[in-house]
Image (cartoon, helix red, strand yellow):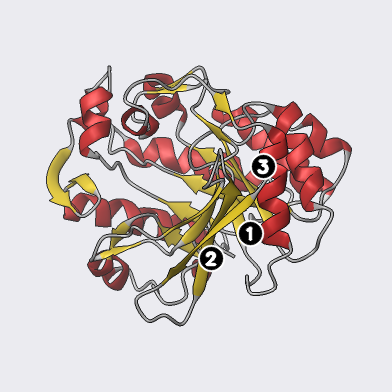
């Protein structure tokens, strides 16, 4: 199967990036670089091994991406392997992380992902990032894969009950994350989107305590986020009850009020650091430059979920 690579340069033309794929699937590995002005979101690699998700989160942006059709679809594995081999053999490509959870839940099909994770073990330069709300981690527990990073999306139990349908409970995800830590995996956490529901401080403090008290050690990094309402997401969301807090527009869709977002982030920073978590390992997802500055976070040293 012929390999195709399209050369893409940043505005400075100092950093070469590419898309990797086959004639039938030209962008299996795709360098995301569509960050709007004023929004902090470092460029990162997507591994497009599948599209869609079996879970039914009311706020999911994939509803808009796929115009309401989220049933999982898979790229033939032989094409995925050809794209990976091209990237692995490219001496001009700097060590990178390939995010397999941007357009699909990374663990929605463990049998396929097991083969992809094993493929990454054939080299030591690049890492596979699993981003998931699943607890399907048996194949990972059975064998440590040093080139794989696991990132679990967590939320308060009340938010899970309201909007994260068909997903394992936060407690089950925490248990899965702990099991991978104990095997030796690098584990990251996303708490996103954080909703200002009634008594939100209590609900999220319970989550923080449950997470950090059950983990065998701190996660490698934690990324925080608040709801983002992209136009297409809002158009195809069947349940819009999660949108009632939106009052502002940004380069990344509708957002809740700046003052409320800042209150949420300050709360999390205070609670996490009170438990001894390193503030430098906390990032905020797709937020404004102003918010990064007001929180005293360094956007130039951005420990985001999707990057190395």
Q: In screen coordinates, is 181 left or right of 34? A: right
Report the mark closest to the observer, 1 or 3.
3
Residue 53 in the image, given as x and y percentages of width and height:
50, 26
Mark with earlier residue (1, 3): 3
Residue that sits furthest to the front in the current view: 2
Residue 19 drawn above or below residue 105: below
- Marks 1 and 3 sit apart, C-alpha to C-alpha, by 28 Å
- Graded by Cα atoms within 10 Å as few (under 14), some (14 to 19) or many (20 or more), the crowding at tag 2 reads some
According to the image, label 3 marks what residue? 80
Kind of element beneath mark 3: helix
Point out which mark residue 66 bears. none
- Graded by Cα atoms within 10 Å as few (under 14), some (14 to 19) or many (20 or more), the crowding at tag 1 reads some
According to the image, label 2 marks what residue? 281
- Marks 2 and 1 sit apart, C-alpha to C-alpha, by 7 Å
Q: In which quarter of the image is the N terminus?
A: top right
Residue 167 in the image, given as x and y percentages of width and height:
53, 22
Mark with earlier residue (3, 2): 3
Residue 276 drawn above or below residue 1: below
The residue at the point 26 percent across, 70 percent down is: 294
Q: In which quarter of the image is residue 232?
A: top left
Residue 38 in the image, given as x and y percentages of width and height:
23, 66
Kind of element beneath mark 1: loop
- Graded by Cα atoms within 10 Å as few (under 14), some (14 to 19) or many (20 or more), the crowding at tag 3 reads many
Report the mark closest to the observer, 3 or 2.
3
According to the image, label 1 marks what residue? 220
Kind of element beneath mark 2: helix
């Amino acid at each position: 199967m012929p390999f195709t690579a399209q050369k893409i340069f940043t505005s400075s033309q100092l950093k070469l990036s590419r898309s990797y794929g086959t004639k039938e699937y030209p962008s299996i590995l795709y360098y995301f670089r569509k960050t709007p002005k004023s929004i902090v979101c470092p460029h990162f690699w997507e591994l497009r091994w599948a599209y869609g998700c079996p879970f039914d989160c009311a706020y999911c942006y994939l509803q808009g991406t796929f115009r309401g059709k989220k049933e999982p679809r898979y790229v033939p594995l032989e094409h995925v392997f050809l794209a990976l081999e091209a990237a692995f053999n490219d001496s001009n490509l700097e060590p990178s992380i390939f995010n397999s959870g941007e357009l699909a839940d990374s663990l929605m099909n463990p049998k396929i992902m097991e083969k992809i994770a094993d493929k990454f073990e054939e080299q030591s330069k690049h890492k596979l990032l699993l981003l998931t709300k699943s607890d399907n981690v048996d194949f990972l527990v059975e064998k440590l894969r040093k080139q794989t990073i696991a990132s679990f999306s967590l939320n308060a139990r009340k938010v899970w009950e309201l909007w994260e349908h068909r997903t394992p409970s936060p407690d089950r995800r925490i248990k899965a994350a702990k099991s991978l830590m104990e095997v030796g995996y690098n584990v990251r956490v996303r708490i996103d989107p954080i909703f200002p529901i009634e008594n939100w401080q209590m609900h999220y403090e319970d989550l923080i305590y449950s997470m950090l008290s059950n983990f065998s050690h701190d996660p490698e990094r934690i990324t925080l986020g608040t709801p983002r309402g992209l136009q297409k997401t809002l158009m195809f969301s069947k349940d819009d009850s999660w949108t009632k807090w939106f009052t502002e527009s940004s380069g990344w869709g509708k957002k809740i009020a700046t003052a409320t977002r800042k209150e949420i982030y300050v709360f999390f920073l205070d609670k996490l650091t009170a438990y001894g978590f390193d503030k430098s390992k906390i990032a905020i997802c797709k937020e404004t430059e102003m918010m990064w500055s007001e929180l005293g976070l360094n956007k130039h040293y951005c420990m985001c979920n999707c990057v190395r």
